[in-house]
Amino acid sequence: MNNIVLVFGASGQLGTCLKSVAADQGIHDIVFPEERSADILNLEGLQIVFEQVKPAYVINCAAYTAVDKAEDEVELARRVNRDGAANLATLCNTHGAILIHISTDFVFEGNIPKLLTEQDPANPISVYGLTKLEGEQAIAAQLQDFYILRTSWLYSEHGNNFVKTMLNLGSTRDELRVIADQVGTPTYAMDLANAIFNIIGTEKHAFGIYHFSNEGVTSWYDFAKAIFDISGMSTRVLPIPGTEYPTKAARPAFSVMDKTKIKNTFNLQIPYWRDSLEICLKKLTNKS
């Protein structure tokens, strides 16, 4: 890869996975600036970074992702998820860079049990989902050369995520109650990182919105059950309806995304969610 790639949100879960995959693949033309010098809300600071790096591709992993807190911190969520994305789009436009922006299945209402395509109408039911959709719209309004990758239930051996939370809780509790009526697909962030580098490597420039998660369908309950089964932990998991675990922000009940477009366009082979979970858990076991 000869083109320089600039990554924002480099210290987060996906940013860390991008670093790992870049190292594994021997990708050197990639820059991970520290967030104090690469604040996506600071347009002047961003301008300096763009002028120094001269990126061909910009990957935006920076986001406000505290789903429940966003209901109270609406303006902060909007500034990061909409205005930050708009800032990057502005500078990509000025500097001729291609933007790869990470979005979410939360842009959908998730009230119909069907595979969600990129053409399905977005109708978010939370502030987080709304501000992420506004970010998508801000990018599309001023940029043509972009990829928006919607993903779901992201986890890895890095950062804070459902898998690590379950392992931590399972080590101290005999029994856990987990929601069984919210259905989606876990996504191993290392698989998403690999997919991003595949998209860049093809140089196809087939711009637009794409869906990416691992293959398959599961509930949070079954996801938790698989984590403990694969890990050999004896924690008992009880299925409960979402009404028994109320949260400030509403979640989509069914947000399984159709990956046909990204698979056909970039010739991607996407792993089954449980196979990727086994790989992640093996890495976490070796780390501990």
Image (cartoon, rainbow, N blue to C red):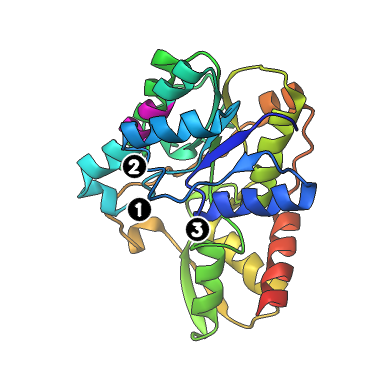
Vertical arrangement, residue 137 with respect to residue 214, above or below: above
- Residue, disc 2: 128
Looking at the picture, tell me which residue is in the foreground, 235 or 195. Answer: 195
Distance from disc 3 to disc 2, alpha carbons, whole Å, reads 22 Å
Mark 2 or mark 1, which has the lower sequence index? 1
Dots 2 and 1: beta carbons under 8 Å? yes
Residue 236: where, in percent of width, then height?
56, 79
Which secondary structure lies at badge 1? loop
Q: Nearer the viewer, mark 3 or mark 2?
A: 2
Looking at the picture, tell me which residue is in the foreground, 209 or 2. Answer: 2
Vertical arrangement, residue 267 with respect to residue 255, above or below: above
Mark 1 or mark 3, which has the lower sequence index? 1
Farthest residue to the front: give it.
52
Q: Which mark is residue 195?
A: none
Q: Nearer the viewer, mark 1 or mark 3?
A: 1
Q: Amino acid at mark 1?
A: Ala
- Residue, disc 3: 180
Which secondary structure lies at badge 3? loop
Dots 1 and 3: beta carbons under 8 Å? no
Residue 271 can be seen in this image: yes
Quadrant in the picture for residue 2:
top right
Mark 3 or mark 2, which has the lower sequence index? 2
Q: Amino acid at mark 3?
A: Ala
Q: Amino acid at mark 2?
A: Tyr
Residue 123 can be seen in this image: no
Residue 211: where, in percent of width, then height?
59, 32
Looking at the picture, tell me which residue is in the foreground, 57 or 225. Answer: 57
Residue 151: where, in percent of width, then height?
55, 40
- Residue, disc 1: 66
**Span of residues in magenta:** 81-88
Residue at the spot 37% in from the left edge and 22% down from the top edge: 138
